[in-house]
Image (spheres, grey):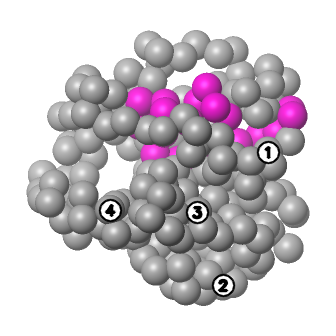
C-alpha cells in the first residue's frame, strides 16, 4: 500500500481519528505572520485542517492553494470548506508546475515527514516563494510524539519521520532560506524560514 492509498482509506474517518489544538495552531501562525491578502500554499492539506485558520489570516482577498495527493482527503476538505478564494489541487506537489516566486507562505503542517526526499522538496518548493516569503514546517505535537505515532501506525507511514532541527536548518540553508523562528519542545515543533 502506498501512502496515498493509506490516506485515502482513512479520509472519511480522519477528522474523528486526529485532533488538532486550535490554540497551538494560532500560536504557530502568529510566528509566521501571514499578511492580509497573502497567497498561501497549504501542502498535504488532508481534510483541510488549516484552511479556516489560514483564511482568518489572509482574509477574503487572500488566496489559499490546498494540495494533497489523496483525492478522497481533498473530497472531504471540499465538502467542509467552500470559500471562494480556496483552490484545491490533487496530486504530488513536487510534480506540479506552480508559479515561481508567487506565494507569501508555504505551509507544511503535519505533513513534512511524508516527503521521501526532504531536502529536494524544500529546495524545489522554496522557488515558489516570493522574496521574504515564509516556509513553515510545523506540528502541534513534539517531534518525538510524531515519530512514535508514525512508527506505531505501521504500514506505509512507519518510516516517515520528522528530522531533527539541525537537519531542517541545513535544508533551509541549501534552499536560500534563513531560519527566523524555531520551537522544538514537548508541545510542538515549528521551523519558519524566510526567503532571502
Look at 87% across and 63% down and name the residue there. 131
Whether residue 112 is visible to the viewer of this picture, yes or no, is: no
Q: Quadrant of residue 151?
A: bottom left
Q: Is residue 152 above or below residue 97?
A: below
Residues at discs 2 and 1 in contact (Cβ within 8 Å) = no
Which numbered dot is residue 174?
Answer: 2
Distance Cα–Cα, label 3 vs label 1: 15 Å
Look at 80% across and 58% down and name the residue there. 133
Magenta region: which residues? 36-54
Which residue does the numbered mark 3 point to in the structure image? 190
Q: Position of residue 43 (x, y in %)?
A: 53, 47
| Residue 50 among those drawn in magenta | yes
Q: Earlier in the sequence, mark 4 or mark 1?
A: 1
Q: Look at the image and tell me in which quarter the C terminus lies.
A: bottom right
Where disc 2 sits, the SS reads helix
Distance Cα–Cα, label 2 vs label 1: 23 Å
Q: Quadrant of residue 83?
A: top right
- Which of these two is toward me, 103 or 161? 161
Distance Cα–Cα, label 3 vs label 2: 18 Å
Residues at discs 4 and 2 in contact (Cβ within 8 Å) = no
Q: Earlier in the sequence, mark 4 or mark 2?
A: 4
Which numbered dot is residue 34?
Answer: 1
Whether residue 145 is visible to the viewer of this picture, yes or no, is: yes
Amino acid at each position: 500500500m502506498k501512502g496515498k492509498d493509506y490516506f485515502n482509506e482513512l479520509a472519511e474517518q480522519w477528522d474523528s481519528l486526529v485532533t488538532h489544538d486550535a490554540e497551538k495552531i494560532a500560536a504557530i501562525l502568529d510566528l509566521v505572520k501571514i499578511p492580509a491578502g497573502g497567497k498561501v500554499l497549504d501542502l498535504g492539506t488532508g481534510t483541510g485542517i488549516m484552511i479556516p485558520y489560514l483564511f482568518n489570516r489572509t482574509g477574503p482577498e487572500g488566496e489559499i492553494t490546498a494540495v494533497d495527493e489523496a483525492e478522497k482527503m481533498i473530497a472531504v476538505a471540499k465538502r467542509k470548506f467552500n470559500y471562494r478564494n480556496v483552490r484545491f489541487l490533487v496530486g504530488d506537489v513536487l510534480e506540479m508546475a506552480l508559479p515561481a516566486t508567487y506565494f507569501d507562505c508555504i505551509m507544511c503542517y503535519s505533513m513534512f515527514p511524508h516527503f521521501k526526499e526532504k531536502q529536494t522538496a524544500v529546495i524545489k518548493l522554496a522557488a515558489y516563494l516570493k522574496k521574504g516569503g515564509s516556509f513553515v514546517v510545523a506540528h502541534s505535537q513534539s517531534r518525538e510524539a510524531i515519530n512514535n505515532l508514525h512508527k506505531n501506525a505501521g504500514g506505509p507511514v512507519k518510516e516517515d519521520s520528522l528530522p531533527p532541527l539541525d537537519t531542517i536548518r541545513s535544508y533551509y540553508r541549501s534552499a536560500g532560506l534563513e531560519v527566523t523562528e524555531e520551537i522544538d519542545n514537548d508541545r510542538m515543533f515549528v521551523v519558519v524560514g524566510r526567503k532571502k
